[in-house]
Image: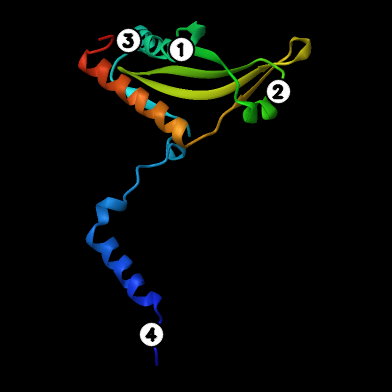
Amino acid sequence: MKAHKGIPALFFLGFAALAFPGCATQPAEISQADSGKPNVVIASRDVDTMKSSLISEMVGFGYHVDKDTPSLLELSRTTTDTITAHAVGTVDSPHERVIAYAFIKQGVSTRVIVDLLMRAQLPGGQVDTMSLNDNGTLYGLIQKQIERLKEEVETGRSGQ
């Protein structure tokens, strides 16, 4: 009986998986978090410092503040993302990419949850908004951003 050519490769892959178990470990997906969105708990109730740091960073990427309340910071910038534009409105409509940071105080900590949105100004003044459920590259970047924020705030290095 003749052995199949793929059998040695299969054994090698099995050996590699057993020999190097930590190398293939992936971080938990954001969808596995309670909110399903980028989020972090920061051991501080100083939301103003958190907002100031986020605004400073995002202005550098062309964002401006749309809404600032005690529990919400919403920033936006104009975008030409035509693929998403078809889902939200018309290609001719002005479109904005929106990042909304919600601040929920929990005892001595604050949970920051981020939502990514696309907003379109439609004819007649109507505004259409669509949540961008990414859980990929963009969510990963935002998750890293708020983890840096957590480290800055908890170590007292905010705004430096």
Distance between the alpha carbons at the discs numbered 1 and 3: 11 Å
Question: Label 2's element?
Answer: loop
Q: Amino acid at mark 1?
A: Ser
Question: Label 4's element?
Answer: loop
Horizontally, is 16 left or right of 51 in the view? left
Q: Identify residue for label 2.
A: 91
Q: Amino acid at mark 2?
A: Val
Distance between the alpha carbons at the discs numbered 4 and 3: 66 Å
Mark 2 or 1: the one toward you: 2
Where is residue 151 drawn, in percent x and y?
Answer: 26, 22
Q: Identify residue for label 4.
A: 3
Q: Amino acid at mark 4?
A: Ala
Badges 1 and 3: C-beta atoms under 8 Å apart? no
Question: Label 1's element?
Answer: loop
Q: Residue furthest right?
A: 124
Distance between the alpha carbons at the discs numbered 2 and 1: 33 Å
Which is nearer the N-term, disc 1 or disc 3? Answer: 3
Q: Identify residue for label 1.
A: 71
Question: Label 3's element?
Answer: loop
Which is nearer the N-term, disc 4 or disc 3? Answer: 4
Q: Residue visible at 22% across and 13% down?
A: 157
Q: Identify residue for label 3.
A: 46
Label 1, residues with CA under 10 Å away: few <14, some 14-19, many ≥20? few
Say which of 133 and 36 sits in front: 133
Q: Residue visible at 27% across and 12% down?
A: 158
Q: Residue visible at 41% across and 81% down?
A: 4
Distance between the alpha carbons at the discs numbered 4 and 1: 65 Å
Label 3, residues with CA under 10 Å away: few <14, some 14-19, many ≥20? some
